[in-house]
Amino acid sequence: MIYPAWFYIFANASIWVSWSILVGYAANFLPEKYFEKDTLITRLRKFETQVWFQKYLKVHISKKYLPEKGVIFGKGTSKKSLPLAEPAALKRLLIETRRAEYVHWIVVFAWVFTLWFNPPWAVWTVATLLIFGNLPCILVQRYNRLRLLRILKN
């Protein structure tokens, strides 16, 4: 069945926003122990260095334009500033970067919910938008984790 363009826009946007809220909300209730160590997904790769993030990706510039929603559900921790004098607070932020990265990876898969009503071109469009919409957030979490690990090492 073919729907008008406004239907696709509204339905896809509703699914994206609803899925993002649901995943973000649910992640706040997961125990911190799940995010204490890096996994295959969150582990930093050898090429992910300060130079790579700053010189090639310009993450340090673009991150100030991204919204901070980690505290929206009351249990998260803001990642806007680093409490340099408190190692426990830095470890908490490290956990929050992993939690936020997982949230953004899971949000990317919202396109699966659009398979039943979108034509193939729209499924690919939604998937592409979700990837490019969440990739900057994922990269910022990885950049912040790199910085936190370096600070905690010293």
Image: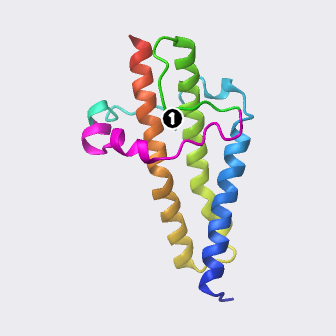
Q: Is residue 77 left or right of residue 151?
A: right
State the residue at coordinates (72%, 28%): 31
Residue type for callout 1: Thr
Task: Name the spot of residue 93 as percent of width and height, x first.
Answer: 55, 25
Q: Residue at x 53, y 28 (%)?
A: 38
Q: Please identify the quarter of the rendering in which residue 91 is found.
A: top right
- Is 73 located above or below residue 43 in the figure? below
- 109 or 13, which is in the foreground? 13
Q: What colouring does the structure picture have?
A: rainbow
Question: Residue at the spot x=45%, y=16% of the render?
Answer: 84
Residue 37 can be seen in this image: no
State yes or no: residue 72 in magenta: yes
Q: Tag 1's secondary structure? A: loop
Residue 129's spot in the image, x, y percent? 49, 64
Q: Residue at x 38, y 33 (%)?
A: 45
Check disc 1: other Cα within 10 Å, few if <14, some if 14-19, many if 20+: some
Q: x and y percent of residue 100 in the render?
A: 57, 39
Magenta stretch in the rendered image: 52-74
Is 12 in the magenta?
Answer: no
Image quadrant assignment for residue 74 = top right
Residue, disc 1: 42
